[in-house]
Image: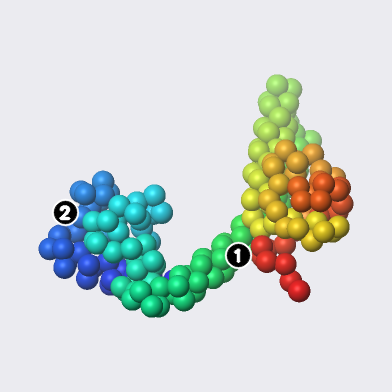
Amino acid sequence: MNQIKIGRFIAECRKKKELTQMQLAEKLDVTDRAVSKWETGRAMPDTSIMLDLCQELGITVNDLLCGEVISMENKEKVLEERLLELVEDKERADKRLLNMEIVIGVISVLFLLVMTFIPSFVEMETWLRITTIVVGFVVCLVGVGFALRIEQIAGYYECKNCGHRYVPKFSSVFWAMHNGRTRYLKCPECGKRTWNKKVISKKTEK
């Protein structure tokens, strides 16, 4: 999506409605600074207020995401293009999340190692030694849990048996045996347990 184009379109529609940024902001219960960011292309309106924004500007969500008023004969084609763009945006976001998962996991393990080795080389009270090690374990567990949550929601798991791609429950991912990002899971489509690999796209490659 072209945020600059969308921003200019928002500003154009607002002016046609003879609204100031402050007046539009008040109607949407946001700050005029937020409206300014939309119109300059520095940010997109949150999905929770898109419908209200479109209603105030007298446009459709499809018009908003395209950055222009779409004619009836082109709506189906443009809608398909927008959906494809949204899918591509999600795939890019999922890739970034999975890269972040690696970083969080590495940092969590390193923190645990540091907090475990410090008591071995630094003279300290017994209670402080135990506290340091416990803090290391707690932070590591929280970090690993957060990384696992990212792995669960980013992308999909592909069933080795039927090829179905799906997002499993967190508990299923947590308890599953794994080899890297490949996990032994039960497919909701065929009901069989196999080694399901992590993939980014929902669409199965032919």
Furthest-left residue in this view: 18
Residue bearing the label numbered 1: 91
Q: Position of residue 113 (x, y in %)?
A: 75, 43
Label 1, label 2: how many angstroms apart (C-alpha)? 36 Å
Quadrant of the rendered image containing residue 100: bottom right
Question: What residue is shown at x 72% (from left), y 38% (from top)?
Answer: 171
The amino acid at mark 2 is: Gln
Quadrant of the rendered image containing residue 129: top right
Question: What residue is shown at x 75% (from left), y 44% (from top)?
Answer: 173
Query: Is residue 42 shown to the viewer in this render?
Result: no
Side of 206 relative to 45 (left or right): right
Question: What residue is shown at x 56% (from left), y 69% (from top)?
Answer: 88
| Callout 1: SS | helix
The vertical placement of 77 against 11, above or below, is: below
Query: In the rendered image, which quarter contains the N terminus?
Result: bottom left
Q: Could you say which disc has been placed on residue 151 in the image?
A: none
The vertical placement of 76 against 167, above or below, is: below
